Amino acid sequence: MNNDCWHALDVITLSHINKVLIGVIIAIVAYAIFLLISDFNTILNKISSFQISYLPIILSLVTGSWCILFLRWTILLKNNGISIPYGQSFLVYIASFSMSATPGQLGELIKSQLLKNKFDVPVTKTAPLVIVERLFDLTGAIIVSIIGFWLLNINIYVPIIASIALILIFLLLKSKKMFNKTLNLIKRVKFASKLADPIAESFDTIQMSLNKKTLVISTIISVCFWILMGISSYFVLRAVGIDSLEIIKIVSIYSSSIIIGAASFIPGGVGVAESSIAGLLSLSGINLSIAFALGILIRIFTLWYGVVVGFVALKISGGLSD
């Protein structure tokens, strides 16, 4: 087993501060551009009208969604014969949110290194589960987007295209033959060739995580997660006095925007996700300047709140001492 390759990946994830700083810089630039192309006074007035009474509701929904994701993570661990005390496992899981502002959230691989350091769990057993998590995230987002847009008779090109891509990925992961052919292609790519062997070692772990029972349960959990995040976004709109959009529409807009942001592979989808939220809200009748402000506000709660809490958990868990 080529542990050196996974070790190299671990070292990369431990440079989390620099990676998150890149995401922060991109966010600052993107948000500054939004302010420049929008009516600053309109944005300021709308943000200043935020009703603090909605804050506990929004934060409770977002935090509750983390608990749902932790349940999915626990199921994936147990399905692969890994048992960690719930309290410490939860702390490690939340600590990984410090890396949410990375391309495809793959920086969350840091939890594999934390589990290795604290519980001597091989990275080769948990790193593939992080990849599986991202697949379930995408699955849940697509399902929520399609259902919401279908019910509201809205164009569903984005979720349909994402669905096709997701189906191809699942077929790839379920077929050993297709999996090996893809690995052979990866080996031809210079910067990715070193990962081919450890990825090959992960096939069985991925297979165990994609059995019928786990697939169904994890997908349901993922759908619940996106619904909660969408509802929290709905209350962000309510907090600034906007109640003209149905809650199911906001849920669909949020999940679709995150899909687009993830597809960009920009750290955290910063700028792209906010623009998508703003664009879809604008198409729904909200002033574009206000829509940009809402996009930023929504992401502060659904992305940056998690990053901040993640760093606190990372410090408590001792991850920052590495």
Image (cartoon, rainbow, N blue to C red):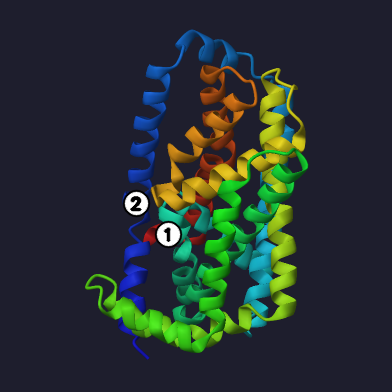
Q: Name the image quarter holding the N terminus.
A: bottom left
Dot 1: within a 10 Å radius of its alpha carbon, few (fewer than 14), some, or many (20 or more) residues? many
Q: Distance between the residues labelled 1 and 2?
A: 8 Å
Residue 223 position within the rendered picture, expressed as x and y whole percent measured from the top left: 71, 56
Q: Which of the 4 image quadrants contains residue 197?
A: bottom left
- Count of numbered labels shown in the rendering: 2
Q: Quadrant of residue 214?
A: bottom right
Q: Residues within 10 Å of mark 2 (few under 14, many from 20)?
A: many
Q: Looking at the image, which is closer to me, 56 or 216?
A: 216
Circle number at residue 19 = 2
Three-letter residue code for mark 2: Lys
Q: Which amino acid does label 1 sit on?
A: Gly
From what the image shows, is residue 309 above or below residue 38?
Answer: below
- Check the picture and name the quadrant holding the C terminus: bottom left
In the rendered image, the residue lying farthest to the top is 41
SS label for mark 1: helix
CB within 8 Å, label 1 to label 2? yes
Secondary structure found at label 2:
helix
Residue 154 location (% of width, % of height)? 68, 38
Q: In this view, does 117 lie above or below 154?
A: below
Image point 51% across, 73% down: which residue?
115
Label 1 or label 2, whichever comes before in sequence order = 2
Q: Name the residue under label 1.
A: 107
Let me know if residue 224 appears in the view. yes
Question: Which residue occupies the foreground of this view, 136 or 2?
Answer: 136
